[in-house]
Amino acid sequence: MNKDLLKTSGPYTHENLTIFLFHAHDQIDGSRYISLKEALEQKKVRVYETGTVGQLEAENLSETVDIFIQAGDVLKGGRQDRTLGIDFIIPARSGRLPIPTFCVESGRWHRRRGEDTVLFSCSTHSLYSKKARMAAKVSMAQDAVWDGVAESQKALGAALKKSVLSAQSPTSYQLSVEDADLEKRKVDFQKELSGISEKSPDTIGYAFYVNGQRNSADVYGSTKLFKKVWDKLLDVAILEAISAPKGKLVVPNTRNVEAWLKQAAKAQPSDSKKAPPRTRLETKSYDNGIVFETFDEATGGHAVLHSNIISD
């Protein structure tokens, strides 16, 4: 996505969280994709436990739609909850494909009550903390992901003044972010911010700040694709805000976020790789952060399907 083509709206603020929205015309037909959450709910995908921590297998059962998995998506079930370190496209009628994963629940390697050890049941959350997301996307080290999960649980516990570790599985990131008191804490944020993306039909991305500090931005090649993942994106921002130590309230302005995009647009390539059958991933670095770009080679491979910017 050409950053010069984006228009910005906002700021939209609640407590220590500020969000800006980006608007532009579609570069890609987003109607061909559904999210991992939708695919699991509609039973259009099966994700299989392989017995190997770092790899699962996924099969798109749909005849017509492709599945877009976003880095950080958490899969619940199997022998351990997992997360994805990269964006990944599962084509329609794919057959079983290997997908690289990281464990976000150390220690468990057995059936959890009410769940299947062979298949994964749902994907309602993503890794929220910048450290955990960077561990999965950059260092790609299992120990670093576990450290990020443990710090996330500790930060949320401190914010709620209670433990968010589940008795069922204390190391499970997914069970921690399902904590009932945490869900209640999120309600006011959701009421204030969940509807902002509906104010304009051409919303194609967002950026968020916590305590006035840049955190992350996501821009998509399609408004439809953005809307399909908006709930998870907002949840990431809300959890970052809740877990952050409260400082002086600072609300950034539009000039700040536009300057951020300009800096990111100057990022220089540092890594390129393919995730068969048709995902291409480009990593770029700039002075104050890193940019991850995802391309679908079935669309010609020129327009960016998803751009994720993470600030240092």
Image: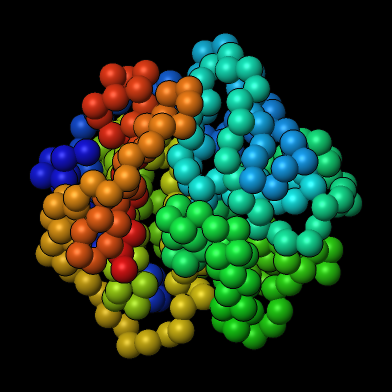
Left or right, 195 with respect to 136, comes to left
Quarter of image, res 181:
bottom right
Q: Is residue 12 visible?
A: no
Residue 279: x %, y % from top left: 42, 29
Q: Quadrant of the N terminus?
A: top left
Quarter of image, res 280:
top left
Task: Name above or below for residue 71 compared with residue 145.
Answer: above
Between 132 and 283, which is closer to the camera in this rendering? 283
Task: Name above or below for residue 272 compared with residue 244.
Answer: above
Residue 49: x %, y % from top left: 75, 37
Residue 296: x %, y % from top left: 37, 26
Q: Residue at x 71, y 79 (%)?
A: 163
Task: Name above or below for residue 191 compared with residue 204.
Answer: below
Q: Residue at x 58, y 17 (%)?
A: 94
Q: Identify the image's colour scheme: rainbow, by chain, secondary structure or one colour.
A: rainbow
Q: Is residue 310 visible?
A: yes
Residue 237: x %, y % from top left: 44, 62
Q: Residue at x 40, y 76 (%)?
A: 15
Q: Residue at x 66, y 31 (%)?
A: 57
Q: Quadrant of the C terminus?
A: bottom left
In the orientation shown, which residue stands out farthest toward the top? 63
